[in-house]
Image (cartoon, helix red, strand yellow):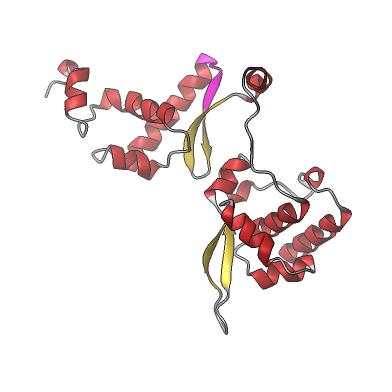
Amino acid sequence: MDLENVTTEHLMSNPDVAPEENIKSILEAILFAASEPISVKQFQHAMPGINTREIRKVLSELRDEYQQMNRSFHLVEIANGYQICTRPEFSEWIRKFYIQQVRVTLSPSALETLAIVAYKQPVTRNDVSAIRGVNSDSVINALVEKNLVCVSGRKEGTGRSLLFSTTDTFLQQFGLKNPSELPSLEEIEQLLSTSNSMEHLGAIQEDMES
């Protein structure tokens, strides 16, 4: 088929056909329609005829175009996917226009527990409780309910205790591409309200460095 003669009507009646010059527009449409980060595999599921390498290439081109055009939004990699987000410098204007979005709120104990899981993952309930010095089952359960923490496997050996790790929702909430982008303990110090919490987190860092 002559790609120059492909019409919008043809694309709509043949969703599996994705001419090369239209891939970028299709990816962009999906990004604008989605409310959450979209993974490369999800893009490929919508366009099975396009390989992942080509999808990544086109997404990179789209990101560069937004950058060159100095738009108020940009394409970012976050939570193992891609999402179109407004630029940080416009956040104040957006807050004035919209009622501030309600985000996940965490108590000091929940934040402390989440930090332990994030820096020590995968980790068991007993490991978390040992670091905090108190039973942490209820806090971990609450984090699981908020989809910030999930069961990621079982520990080898007697008992085969459940192992917990952070989720993609955790990455999205904290604006991280992947766990390797976790801030240093000094950078998250302002989020913690007690010196006791910092002592526990300091123990985590010492354990990781040993």
**Position of residue 91 measured from the top left corner of the image (x, y, whole percent):** 65, 23
Name the residue: 42% across, 42% down: 39
Q: Is residue 176 visible?
A: no
Where, quadrant-wise, is the C terminus in this rendering?
bottom right
The residue shown at (67%, 18%) is: 96
Q: Is residue 71 magenta?
A: yes
| Rendered residue at 49%/45% (across/down) | 80
- The N terminus - image quarter: top left
Residue 129: x, y in percent?
73, 69
Residue 14 lies in what quarter of the image?
A: top left
| Residue 82 at x, y percent in the picture | 47, 36
In the picture shown, does residue 108 fall above or below 69? below
Tell how many labels: 0
Where is residue 49? Give x, y as percent: 23, 39
| Residue 74 visible at all | yes
Find the magenta span and give its range: 69-74
Which residue in the rendered view is the most extreme toward the left? 1
Residue located at (75% from left, 71% from top): 130
Instruction: Give the camera-side residue of 119 and 109.
Output: 109
Q: Is residue 191 above or below residue 76?
A: below
Q: Is residue 131 left or right of residue 62?
A: right
**Residue ranking furthest to the right:** 195
Q: Is residue 54 left or right of residue 119?
A: left
As drawn, 109 above or below 17: below
Q: Residue furthest bottom?
A: 158
Q: Is residue 61 magenta?
A: no
Front-most of 71 and 193? 193
Quadrant in the picture for residue 73? top right
